[in-house]
Image: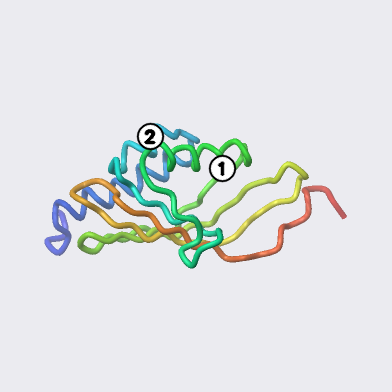
Amino acid sequence: MSDPAVSDLDALRLRKLELVFEAFNRHDGAGVMSAMTDDIVFDAAAGPDACGRRIVGTEAVRAAFEGTFATFPDVSWECTRHAVFGDRGISEWIFRATAKDGSRIEAEGVDLFGFRGELICSKSAFRKDRPALPAKGAA
């Protein structure tokens, strides 16, 4: 039996968060973007502005995500929790990736989402600033 406190739209939005992270972990740019509006606003975790680096629109946001896939061929996000409340959503995750020099990144993070209808219209990423871990097998 479904929870009466969870609306049908909230359930659709929660499923959208699950699907978008499945697409991230497949390195599927088209799949990620299918969850987002054409005017998506993505605030990256790092950048020159208070918001990190703001990227707007399907083409630019997809290019940013695909750049991450290319830079870190083994990148993954282990989701530990998703939640939806009205037109807002949150996903907690552990980011893991190996840099070209073999050093590794493993840090907790969170995304704050805005929804318009069933689609994501904004994504703001926050990740712990942690020093890189040594390459596997390094002393």
**In the image: residue 70, left or right of residue 120:** right
Residue for badge 1: 68
Residue 127: percent from left, percent from top: 53, 62
**In the rendered structure, are the residues bearing label 2 and label 1 in contact, judged by CB atoms less than 8 Å apart?**
no
Residue density around tag 2, few if under 14, some if 14–19, many if 20 or more, within 10 Å = some
Q: Secondary structure at mark 1?
A: helix
Compare residues 52 and 88 and report the one nearer the observer: 52
Residue 130: percent from left, percent from top: 65, 65
Outermost residue toward the left in this view: 4
- Is residue 94 placed above or below 64 in the rendered structure? below
CA separation in Å, label 2 and label 1: 15 Å
Q: Which mark is residue 31?
A: 2
Disc with the residue nearer the chain's start (2 vs 1): 2
Q: Quadrant of the C terminus?
A: bottom right
- Give amino acid for label 2: Gly
Residue at 31% in and 61% down: 83
**In the image: residue 37, left or right of residue 76:** left
- Give amino acid for label 1: Thr
**In the image: residue 57, left or right of residue 63:** left
Q: Which mark is residue 14?
A: none
Residue at 46% in and 41% down: 24
Q: Quadrant of the N terminus?
A: bottom left
Residue 56: percent from left, percent from top: 38, 47
